[in-house]
Image (cartoon, rainbow, N blue to C red):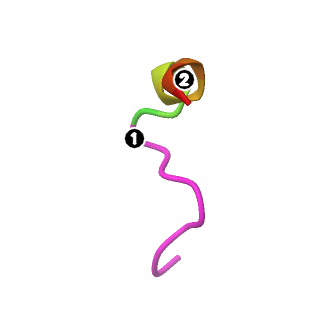
Amino acid sequence: MAHPKRKISKTRRDKRRT
């Protein structure tokens, strides 16, 4: 896992902003 396509850091609230 060098650099995942989607960041698993803040994807829950990131989905709402995007």
Measured as percent of width and height from the top left, residue 8 is found at 49, 45
The magenta region covers 1-9
Residue identifier under label 2 = 12
Looking at the rendered structure, the secondary structure element under dot 2 is helix
Give above or below for 10 relative to 13: below
**Disc marking residue 9:** 1
Residue at x 49% of width, y 22% of height: 17
User: Farthest residue toward the bottom?
Assistant: 2
Could you tell me the amino acid type at mark 2? Arg
Cα distance between the residues tagged 1 and 2:
9 Å
Measured as percent of width and height from the top left, residue 18 is found at 56, 30
Give above or below for 16 relative to 7: above
Give above or below for 9 relative to 16: below
User: Farthest residue toward the left?
Assistant: 9
Q: Residues within 10 Å of mark 1 (few under 14, many from 20)?
A: few
Measured as percent of width and height from the top left, residue 12 is found at 54, 23
